[in-house]
Amino acid sequence: MNILVTNKHSMELTNLNIDTIQAINGEFSIDDLVNQFSNFVFNKMIIDITAIKDYQNINTIQQLSTKFDMSRVILLLDDSITSDIYLSELVAFGIYNFTKDINQINYLIEHTNSYDEVKQYHKQDIVTSNNVENRENVNNSPVTNTVSEGLKILGVKNVTPHAGATTLVYMLKKQLEAYYKVVAVEVDNKDFLYLNDPTLKNTTSLDLPAFIATNRDVEVILVDLNDKASTNSCTDVIYLIEPGLIKLNKLIGKDKNAFERIKNNKLVLNKSVLTDADKYDFEYESKTKIFYNIPYLDDKKSYHPELDEFLANLGFSKIKQGEKKKKGSFFDLFKKS
């Protein structure tokens, strides 16, 4: 079932006979939409962009992208949006499901766009910085470019409670540093503090795009997304599942359709004791496909061969599997940051 948010284009959208769980009409702030739909279970939210107050201000749309999973939001754009920069910013924010053609809406309900399908709108020659403190109407304002073309932004998000995203991001950073210029950032939390590594960064959901824009000189940004941070700024996202009985039962108890909702993403078993045979049984019962099965790892070590294979599978081509790195000391725990 879908949510329909309409204003100027209400009649055209209603005529599409979209299967809806709720429809609202009028002009709404982002907070209005969050308050009304943050706890809804839905397939897609179709938004007539004129239903968003101050929609021509790209900051408003950026705020929308931090509050909802934009892979499940479809924006019907208005003809008043004529700027190539505006469209480029949508893509830069990770908003791929947009169209001015009402006849494309039903297609987007069934098909979620990838970056490849909208990359023609992302103008690399236009400087489009996500650091938008002083920018208001992108239809009329020159802006600057967001991220360098080769930058990998890997988001890590827990599916089951406390599945280990923060620690895994830390270990991945240590593993990648031998091959890439890397920065790791935690969103909306400060658990990185307890790892005693001053190079680890913190930011908020709203400021994440700006953080990425100011770190576009690196090759890899690792993002601990925590619970509510949007995945839209990431070029790739892994979803962590700790396959313990209690954790899985808590997840299903909270949302019985949890696996149906995430099955098309890169699912990673973390802190896992499952064998390959167990993993196949898990896939069969959950009707999912597991991207990788990461066992319990000692976070005091600076090198894990299991992570080399995992990172190579994610497309980090500089990784040389099996090449041992210098081991850290257990007593690194007591180093002062």
Image (cartoon, rainbow, N blue to C red):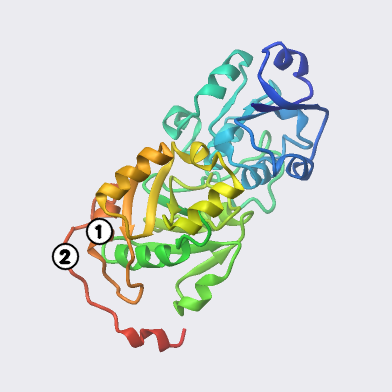
> Residue 325: x and y, percent?
21, 71
Tell me: 236 left or right of 141: left
> Residue 16: x and y, percent?
67, 12
Taking the view exactly as shown, the residue that stands out farthest to the right is 26
Label 1: few (<14), some or many (≥20) within 10 Å? many
Q: Nearer the viewer, residue 229 or 246?
A: 246
Residue wearing tag 1: 308
| Quadrant in the picture for residue 95 | top right
Vertical position of residue 274 compared to residue 323: above or below: above
Name the amino acid type tagged 1: Asp
Residue wearing tag 2: 323
Name the amino acid type tagged 2: Glu
> Residue 124: x and y, percent?
46, 39
Circles 1 and 2: CB distance less than 8 Å?
yes
Q: Classify mark 2: helix, strand or loop.
A: loop
Tell me: 240 left or right of 85: left
| Quadrant in the picture for residue 81 | top right
Q: Nearer the viewer, residue 98 or 133?
A: 98
> Residue 56: x and y, percent?
72, 35
Label 2: few (<14), some or many (≥20) within 10 Å? few
Q: Is residue 129 visible?
A: no
